[in-house]
């Protein structure tokens, strides 16, 4: 599906605002701090029930307000869907065609989104938690099973860690038996996650390298590498062997919650050796590969959100980048200026100018 209309209310810098989008390429243009990323964030939050930049949902409430709302009208050419997200009192509720969804888990994945934002570069700058979240956001949309299994795993992990802390004072037989049960459940769910992560990385690699070569015209080989903290066959053994250490530390030492990922080009970790351009390219290519996976495997077209993507890319790469998204029905990108953009690309694009005078309504040009 693609988004046709977006309404936001007391959402960051927007008091009340409406933006119209169309199928194909949409370019949101405006000065710094005018609200471009905020629009992309609103669509992301509406479709995935989660922002890509806010640490807490409350950050998105406009200063001095106490709630926000986002409404989107979606279409697939034939049918329409209206989705409303309401946030107030620390609670997020979503209505699809006037009916509240019961669990967010059943909602996520229905309106797939592939989003590139300059903050993705944190993949190379921050710790493994960011990288796991980065990949998890992709996996949860592709596989509802993954979402449920990882929720289950996190629940067991929390329980197990709490018990390990209790066992620092009380390592009675009763607690030891309980720990064994939790360990077994953790290993069962953990092994499922390891399998799903392995197969996701294999699938994405089938597309990734070709995408990189097409975009950059290079012969270098790009790969995403999954680094599980523990191999499936050793998970059980290691966890049992670590009994005393885990009780001492009060936390679970091995498992998917400690996994990591790296990108390699010609067998070199580009987090360590890659140029900034190569790092950005790897992240963009993984997003392109993901959108291809949606189109081919799931037979759905994601909405592609590209925030500030053209910086540092020359005209030919800009064109190539967009042509690599040609299978998707809608691309929404932001930029501060159209002057660097190839004029040919603008012919069929829906250009949306944001400016301060038009405070409440941003129509189509
Ligand atoms: N909760 C909030 N309430 C009100 N305003 C906010 C809130 N959070 C952020 N802002 C403001 O919203 C404005 C728009 O931010 P946004 O990141 O969307 O700008 P942008 O157009 O993407 O800018 P740039 O080109 O620099 O990336 C900024 O002035 C920011 O300070
Ligand atoms: Mg921005």
Image: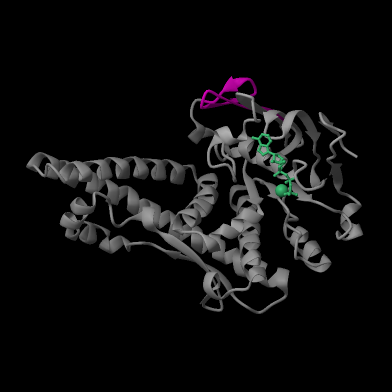
Tell which residue pokes out farthest to the front in this image: 64
Tell which residue pokes out farthest to the top in this image: 98
Give whichever of 318, 214 is nearer the camera.
Answer: 318
Residue at position x 62%, y 30% from top? 61
Q: How many marks?
A: 0
Where in the figure is residue 183, as x and y percent of width and height? 23, 48
> Quadrant for ligand 1?
top right
Residue at position x 48%, y 29% from top? 103
Q: Image quadrant of residue 275?
A: bottom right
Where in the figure is residue 345, as x and y percent of width and height? 87, 56
Tell which residue pokes out farthest to the left in this image: 173
- Quadrant where the C terminus is found in the figure: top right
Residue at position x 71%, y 72% from top? 216
Residue at position x 82%, y 68% from top? 316
Horizontal side of residue 86 vs 16, given as left or right = left
Horizontal side of residue 128 vs 345, given as left or right = left
Where in the figure is residue 347, as x and y percent of width and height? 91, 52
In the rendered structure, does residue 281 fall within the stretch colored magenta?
Answer: no
* Residue bounds of the magenta highlight: 79-101
Q: What kind of secondary structure does the magenta stretch mostly adopt?
A: strand
Relative vertical location of residue 84 with respect to residue 263 in this rendering, above or below: above
Horizontal side of residue 253 vs 297, given as left or right = left
- Quadrant where the N terminus is found in the figure: top right
Where in the figure is residue 307, as x and y percent of width and height? 71, 51
Relative vertical location of residue 92 with respect to residue 33 in this rendering, above or below: above
Q: Is residue 290 visible?
A: no
Give whichever of 320, 335 is nearer the camera.
Answer: 335
Relative vertical location of residue 322 with respect to residue 22 in this rendering, above or below: below
In the rendered structure, does residue 96 fall within the stretch colored magenta?
Answer: yes
Relative vertical location of residue 267 with respect to residue 198 in this rendering, above or below: below
Horizontal side of residue 187 vs 85, given as left or right = left
């Amino acid at each position: 599906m693609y988004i046709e209309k977006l309404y936001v209310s007391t959402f960051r810098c927007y008091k009340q605002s409406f933006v119209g989008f169309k199928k194909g390429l949409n370019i949101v243009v405006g000065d710094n701090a005018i609200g471009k990323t905020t629009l992309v964030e609103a669509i992301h939050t509406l479709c995935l029930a989660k922002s890509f930049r806010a640490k807490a949902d409350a950050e998105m409430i406009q200063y001095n307000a106490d709630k926000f709302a986002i409404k989107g009208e979606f279409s697939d050419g034939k049918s329409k869907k209206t989705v409303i997200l309401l946030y107030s009192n620390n609670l997020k509720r979503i209505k699809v065609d006037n009916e509240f969804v019961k669990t967010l888990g059943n909602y996520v994945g229905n309106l797939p989104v592939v989003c590139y934002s300059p903050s993705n570069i944190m993949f190379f700058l921050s710790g493994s938690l960011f990288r796991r979240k980065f990949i998890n956001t992709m996996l949860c949309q592709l596989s509802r099973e993954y979402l449920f299994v990882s929720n289950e795993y996190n629940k067991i992990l929390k329980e197990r860690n709490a018990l390990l802390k209790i066992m620092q004072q009380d390592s009675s037989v009763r607690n030891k038996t309980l720990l064994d049960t939790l360990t077994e459940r953790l290993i069962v769910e953990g092994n499922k996650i390891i399998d799903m992560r392995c197969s996701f990385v294999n699938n994405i690699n089938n597309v990734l390298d070709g995408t990189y070569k097409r975009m950059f015209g290079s012969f270098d080989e790009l790969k995403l590498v999954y680094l599980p903290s523990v191999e499936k066959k050793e998970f059980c053994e290691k966890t049992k062997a670590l009994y005393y250490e885990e009780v001492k530390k009060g936390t679970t030492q091995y498992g998917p919650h400690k996994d990591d990922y790296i990108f390699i080009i010609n067998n070199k970790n580009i987090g360590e050796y890659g140029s900034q351009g190569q790092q950005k390219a790897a992240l963009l290519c993984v997003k392109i590969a993901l959108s291809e996976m949606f189109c081919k495997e799931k037979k759905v077209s994601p909405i592609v959100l590209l925030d500030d993507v053209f910086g540092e890319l020359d005209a030919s790469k800009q064109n190539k980048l967009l042509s690599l998204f040609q299978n998707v029905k809608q691309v929404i990108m932001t930029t501060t200026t159209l002057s660097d953009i190839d004029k040919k690309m603008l012919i069929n694009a829906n250009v949306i100018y944001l400016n301060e005078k038009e405070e409440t309504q941003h129509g189509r040009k």
